[in-house]
Image: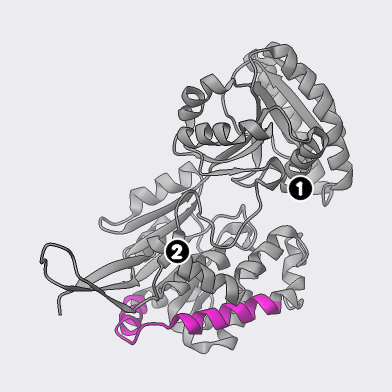
Amino acid sequence: MILAKGKLYGEEEREVLLARLEDEINETRVRAPLRSETVIAALDALGRHIENGQFDAQLAALGLSRRTDAVRTATAMLRRENLEYRLHMELGMHLGSEYPLTPPNGSARRICRAVPLGTVLHIAAGNADGLPVLSLAEGLLTGNINLLKLPQADGGLSVEAVRCMLEIEPELADYIYIFDTPSSDVVTLQRLAALCDGIITWGGDAAIEAVRRFAPVGAKLIEWGHRLSFAYISGYEDEQLELRALAEHIIQTKQLLCSSCQTIFLDTEDMEQVYAFCEKFLPYLEEASRRFPQEGIEETAEQTLRRYLDEMVQAIRGRAADTRVYRGEFCRLEACLDDNLVLSGLFGNCPVKRLPAARMLPVLRREKGRLQTAGLICAPERRLALAQRLMCCGLVRITRAGDMSESLCGEAHDGEYPLRRYVRIVEVEP
């Protein structure tokens, strides 16, 4: 399925559409720039349609509802007040507005303007609900023409959402092209990339490496790769409250997000404290598992298969003796002797390891460039010092443990303001 200029086409029309795509893009680019107000009004209306239940059937097909946290977060990000706040916070100027520059020391005067990159290709991943539409929204907010490659698990939700938005604001039709192209079709992706000034990639290392191989020289690569996040515990402010919040975070996010807790680190050298923590924390994890059960038999089966496959791999590699396993109902903790930050077994399966604050920097820097969120649990008087040390290690978000995946409007994404990456700063001498 292909959506081009507001119309749906079958895959049999792909070659014809690709052959005329560059001419259509060029015709759009020479027009007056797309106004931010036009985009904001359309996105705000789309969000309200989602909240009012227009997409309940499509969400249900993906195992979601408009009351799911991820969907509520996505619709909140589409509200007018949030979009206007982001433009102000991230760009600091209205797109296309002119600002005079008068440098010191008698330098020549310039007129400065933020303008779109031009044409951007979004290669969306399927691990975050609503991601294709949110990525597309960023491209539209910055005035770009957007080519969107859908993830395999989209289920038609993005196309229906975009069609709804185009009914609200037909002017956006010339700025959106959607292709249901598989990642294995490298030839088509190369042809799309050749038309673009920027390529936005969401996904793991393999996906990013694949894009780097076919991206044309000169195209700006905007990479949002997978990140690792963890909880760090060095004392407590309110032990029961904080451990309950961490357990609920682990279970509710299923550890599928870049901001999900993948490993729990304790500020200790004593392995006995790790064992004692696992015994203490497991009941909290079991309670959260009962409060927030898996949504269906498929997820329960996947969780069970992951757990037993992981145990088999450990046994084959001879590592089972290095790990003490604490099994609960639909959850599991592993007390490990090593100190590596690793991806968890997901779905309530989490390793627990020692990491004294004095060794934090050399250990965490092994994953430099991949660190995102630290959920910090500690005594109040230690919070500032430990947060400073985590920043030095490369973390870009330091939160309370229960808030690791909470999204705030206008916050940086992986340490950067996204909208800044989708524009160029042009200086003109009057």
Position of 361 relative to 201 (above/below)? above
Q: Residue at x 75, y 31 (%)?
A: 307
| Amino acid at the residue labelled 2 | Glu
According to the picture, the residue beneath numbered tag 2 turns out to be 90
Q: Residue at x 67, y 35 (%)?
A: 380
| Amino acid at the residue labelled 1 | Gln
Across and down, in percent, residue 96 comes to 34, 78
Position of 75 relative to 254 (above/below)? below
Position of 218 relative to 335 (above/below)? below
Q: Are marks 1 and 2 in contact (CB under 8 Å)?
A: no
In this rendering, would 334 be left or right of 185? right
Quadrant in the picture for residue 43: bottom right
Which mark is in front, 1 or 2?
Answer: 2
| Residue 122 falls within the magenta-colored stretch | no
Specify start and end residues of the magenta stretch as a single range.
20-49
According to the picture, the residue beneath numbered tag 1 turns out to be 252
Disc 2 crowd rating (10 Å Cα; few below 14, some 14-19, many 20+) is some
Q: CA distance from mark 1 to mark 2?
A: 30 Å
In this rendering, would 373 be left or right of 112? right
Quadrant holding the C terminus: bottom left
Across and down, in percent, residue 152 comes to 59, 58
**Color theme of the render:** one colour
Label 1 secondary element: helix
Quadrant in the picture for residue 238: top right
| Residue 41 falls within the magenta-colored stretch | yes
